[in-house]
Image (cartoon, helix red, strand yellow):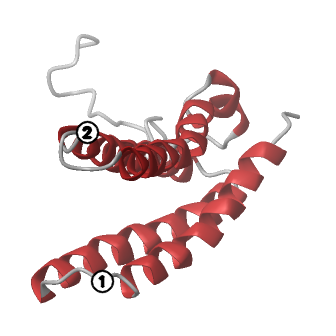
Amino acid sequence: MKNTTPLKLIGALWIILGPIEVLQALISTVKSDTDYYIQFGVFALTGMLSVISGVGLLFLKQWALQTLRVLSWLTFAYYAGSGALITGLSLTKLPELSLSKITVLLFVGLMVIATGIPFLLMALYLGSNRTKTAVRPYKNTINTEQSAAGYPPQSVGSPEQ
């Protein structure tokens, strides 16, 4: 039996992170109502998806593994992109800002990038060969066996004629 404790821990973490993600969208302070509703919709959708997939990963479902792998990559890209944007914008303001303000902005940008590193590690772990053998594979719902006599009909176009 494979050790599935890390997978179940990741599933539980995503169950906890889903509502936090929705809460993060609820308390957002974007200025435009349109931006707020779009942001809330995206965060609520991914939050619900993460809770559902987290429960699925607790039961070691293949679809949950793939869904959380994609969500982990997207979350890493979100944090890494936001941190890179903060860092890049602070570097463009070098002549205008004092050294202490630039230092704070660079620190904040790098910490936002660092926040995404656990999601990168999760995505890499969920894509590893160890996890693919630990989850239950997809069930083949199509019956490919010929259970009925005469299927396919032997009289029509059959080489046995």
Q: Quadrant of residue 36?
A: bottom left
The answer to which of marks 2 and 1 sits earlier in the sequence is: 1
Q: Is residue 31 above or below residue 63?
A: below
Whole-percent x, y for residue 21 in the image = 47, 72
Query: What residue is disc 2 on?
Result: 88
Specify whether 43 is left or right of 17.
Answer: left
Q: Is residue 108 above or below residue 18?
A: above
Q: Residues within 10 Å of mark 2 (few under 14, many from 20)?
A: some
Residue type marked 2: Gly
CB under 8 Å between discs 2 and 1:
no
Specify whether 52 is left or right of 8.
Answer: left
Q: Which label belongs to residue 15?
A: none
Q: Quadrant of residue 13?
A: bottom right
Of residues 4 and 159, the one drawn nearer to the viewer in this rendering: 4
Q: Is residue 97 above or below residue 12?
A: above
Residue type marked 1: Thr
